Structures are given as structure tokens and as C-alpha cells.
Amino acid sequence: MNHNHLGRTLPTLAPGPRGAFAAPMTTIAKSRKNSTACTSCKAAKRKCSGRPAPCKACQTSKVACIFDESLDLRRKVAVRRTQGELQHYKGLLTTLFNKIRDADEADTHKIVEAIQCSDFEDITTASERLELPSTEESSSDSSSEDSENDSESPKELSDPEKTMRLTIERLCDTPLYQVPSSWTYCDADDFVVSHLVSLYFTWDHPFSQILDQDLFLIDMTVDPDFCTPFLMNSILAVAATYSDYPKIYAIRGIDSSRGQDFFEEAERLWKAERGRPTLANIQAVTLMSRFLQFQGQRQASWLMLKQALQLAKDIGLFHSPRRHWGSHMPVRTRHVYAVAAWGLYIMNSEMSFERGRAPDLEPPWSNPDTACDYDEGIVWCAYPRFEKDDFQELPAQLNATFNQTVLLAKIAVRIQEFLFKESWDMTKSEMEATADDLMNQLRLVIEGLPASEVEQRELPHVLLVHIKYHHTVLLFFEYLWDHQRMEATPEQIRSYRLEPAKKIVEYLGVFEDRFGLRRVPRQMLEPANRSLLALLVFIEEEESWEPMIDLCRFMAACSTRFVLAEQMCLQFELIIKASNVVLPQEAYEVLKGRGVNASDWL
């Protein structure tokens, strides 16, 4: 063959694609397949853009967008799910066998009766409601391999309360609110989600209101704009701190992991929102800030709160032209926005005071009365109930407590501006006159709180208003005397340090006598810690010993649930060590034995 001839007749080839760089393009260009469509798109038989919620179709049509992972039938996902279920049922059968083997006839009858009870959907749900012994207790004569596994996590298995092996009586109590688990992707069934929402509206919402309880529960089934998966997961994360269900632990047996899965899901949804300023997002970010505070991450909590405040400013809750909030807005909707605005204002004031700075936030332009207008028919009762008639339902008094908390916050902001801005340019006599005037304003607020002895005993959020008053007094004069170097007489020190601390201990005692220390609202931690520090000044006086012992026991009990409380205990121990102060022996033993003897106090 004549190769020279071929070279003259054939056209020059165009350069081909560069092989070294072409291969990755096929992977990048490959279309992503959604694992499963949302329930709304499945029902409408339309194309779904996939996660995160809401998908484009649901966002356009303004309907609830819920992805159900149980409908994902892909082979790998199904295999993982089947493997997890098999492991779960294997552990369930082993635990039930050990329980029945070691139980007497009466206990065995209770187990069988509980499993057959019509209130339980299946054996799994029934077993979770039984008070089962730890694996360590039921496998004393098992193989050496089981003993080795038990020794790896003695803290997890040594105390049944750690993993909430609850009694039948306690778990027979029905949650106050029924909420479907479809609001979250986390591993939680309808019962657990309903349980957590009930805990939130019992032990957190009345103490730091950021949303309207009635409207939220209605919007949960009607209006996806005011109840979103992001807001719901934030609520579940906060509420999980008050629960002991095994499913709410991200890491089994680790107390600080309560609600972490819900929080991470809320974080993912917040990233998907891309900073969109909506009321639900403001409320959700505020609750995320609260969760971080539970975890002792104060700086992260502060920064998260600042995000919520900026979102609130963006939609005009603080200094927007009022034309956006005219008569066209329904009265009840104005109320919901007012609750969020004043709730943020209160939280910002409290966190700023604890950090020793002025809040730098103008009050919301809405009238506080707008946030307190609606309270019809709302009752409060401790949940869960241990006995049917253990706690009675009472009018919640949410409007009265919220209104008094707003008034306290306004005066606290005025105190902060005086301490951290104005006092530097004042004479001593001017500072004394201003301090006396502010104290008189504080007294008027607390005297205006309509609280009978029954309300003080049965409504813990009424107790909290009184605690906040004395906490404000402690902070006020601590900064005035210790940081402003203003002199005080011994009588003033007793009146504004010892007496407020003792009153806080008294109210905490009322709470403990009625509700115990298993579920202490987080909002009581800072006042308790500040009172503990105030009592150190009077440690030489026998009068302070009993209140200090009670506070040490209170903080030690809370340290099993809140990382923040454990940090406070550690800080208190460091202060004691550095100052060479000798505590009462019982107080010392309580602090030393926290986490070990906590079940004796709960």
C-alpha cells in the first residue's frame, strides 16, 4: 500500500477530546435520582424535585412537603433498614427472655398483660413501656463474651433510669398532644414525637414563649407557613432535653446527646432555607439558640440568637415602617408576630445581662398587650403524670406571666443601660438615686403579679417570674458593687444579696416539693447558679449553710440533664479551690457525688 498517496487524499482529522479530562465529565453530567418523592407529589402523581423539603412543587402550591423514608424501596436502603430491624428484634427478644426468666409469677403476669394490652400496637412498643432490668443484671450467668460487652459500658447499663426503662404506670399516660412523626426524618415514631411536643408545651414554652400554643397546634395540620419541619425539629431538639426515652439519645447512655439528631436535622433544614426571613424560621433559630445553651455552648447560642434577631429586623418586628402591619393583617396573626417579637426581646435582655453588657435592642413597636390578648381555654398540667389524679389542670395564666415578664425585661434593659453606659458619667449620689428608683420599679412589677398560693405551687412558670425578679436584683447589685466599685453597707449587702438568694432557694424548694427534680426548666439554672455564688459571701454564717446545700443538690441533679449545669458545678468547684473556702461537709459531698448519687435526688 502506498502510504504517501493516502496522506495526500485523506482530510486532516479534527482534534479529538482529551481523554485524561473527559472521564469525569460523565459523572458530573449524570442526572441525580431522587431517593423518593414527597407524599404530596406521590398523591398528585407529579414530578418531585426531591429533598430538602419543601420541594419546588409543594413550595409553589403551598402545601405540606413531607418525605417518608419508609417508602424508599431502593435495594441498599431496604437492606440497611432490614438489618437494623433484625438487630433490634434480636435485642428485644433477648431482653424479654431474660426478664421473664428472672421474674416471679406476678411480674411475669404483668409482662404478658402489657404485651397483650390493646393500647400497644405491637410487642416492640409494649416492651419499651416495661421496666426492664439492665443487661448487666440479667446476664450474670451468661457467656464471657456478654460479660466483656457489659464491661465496656458500665455507665450505660448500671442505671435503668439512664436508658429510661420506664415503669408501666408512667408510660400508660397518654401524651397531651398527638403529633405525626412525618414532621421529622429522625428515628422517632408518632408516640415519641407526641411525647416530645407535650414536654415542650409543659416544661419549656410557658417559661420562654416564642410562639402561640393554640395557633401552632392548629397550623400543624392547616398552614405549612407557620409550622414547618425546620420549626418542628427545633422544638423536638429542645424538648428532648426533658425526656429519657432511648430513641432521643443520639449516643445511647450519653446524657448530653439527647436531641442531637433533631438538632442536626434542624441545622440541615436551616442551611436549605438560605437565611430566608420568615416567622417560622425566626422561631426555629431562636429554639436552636436555646438548645445550644442547654449544651453549654454559650457563645454559639449567643451568635444563633443574633441571627434570629436579624431575621426579625428584616421582616420588621422591631423598627419597620408600620404600613407593613396595617389593618389588613388579621388580629390573631398580629398577635403571633407580637409574641415572637417580645419573646426575642426578653431572651436578648436576659442573655445580655448574664454576659454583662447592654442589650442594644429597641423594644418591638407592637404593643405588649397584643401579645397577651389570647389565652382562652389554655390549661396547664404537669406531664407526664405518674398517677391519674396526681396533678390537676389549672388555667395556664400564660398571658399574665408573659406580661409580667415583659415588664421585668423592660426594667432589666433600663438597669443594663444604667450599669454599662450611663453610670460612668454619674456622681455617686446620682448613681444611688437611680438605683433606688429602678428598685422601686422592680417592686411594682412583682407586686402586680396575680399569684395565689395555689398558683405558686401548681404553676411553675408563675414561680419563675418571682425567681426572675430576685435574679435581676442579684445581677443588678453584683455589677453595681463589684464592677462599678460602689460602696455598700452590710445591711445593703444582706438585703440585696443574701435575701434574694434565700428567696430563690425557697421558690426552687416549692418547685421540687411539687414536681421533683427530674424535669427542671432550663430557665431556673442561671438564677440558681447566681444564688450559689452570692451565698459564698456569707459562707461563715450558719444561716447560709442550708440554702447552699439545697442549691448544690439542685445543681448536681440538673447536671445529669444539662451540660450547662455541669459546667456551672465545675466552675463553682474551681472558685472554691482558688479562694480556699470551706463548704459545709454535706454540700461538698453532694458536689463530689453528682452523677453517681443523682438518682437519690430525682
Image: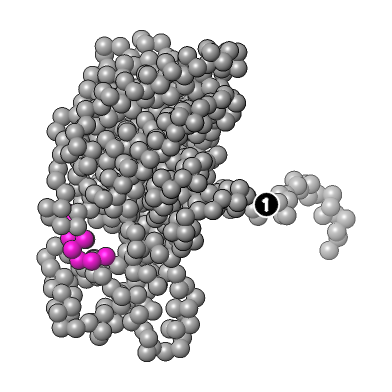
Image quadrant where residue 428 sits: top right
Residues 310 and 423: in front is 423
**Residue beneath the point at 49% across and 61% down:** 592
Instruction: Say left or right for 392 vs 98.
Output: left
Residue for point 27% across, 41% down: 460
Q: Residue at x 84, y 49 (%)?
A: 8
Q: Nearer the viewer, residue 67 or 452?
A: 452
Whether 428 is drawn above or below 357: the answer is above
Where the N terminus falls, by quadrant?
Answer: bottom right
Identify the residue at image location x=52%, y=26%: 488
Residue 224 location (% of width, % of height): 29, 35
432 is within the stretch colored magenta: no
Residue 229 visible in the current orientation: no
Residue 508 placement: quadrant:
top left
- Specify start and end residues of the magenta stretch as a single range: 166-174
Which three-letter amino acid code belongs to the residue tagged 1? Ala
Q: Secondary structure at mark 1?
A: helix
Above or below, comparing residue 518 to residue 145 in the picture: above
| Crowd around label 1: few <14 · some 14–19 · many ≥20 (10 Å) | few
In percent of width and height, residue 282 lies at 41, 31
Residue picked out by circle 1: 22
Q: Is residue 170 magenta?
A: yes
Vertical placement of residue 124 versus 72, above or below: below
Q: Is residue 303 above or below residue 372?
A: below
Q: Position of residue 235 (x, y in %)?
A: 35, 43
Instruction: Residue 602 in the image: state x and y as whole percent.
Output: 33, 58
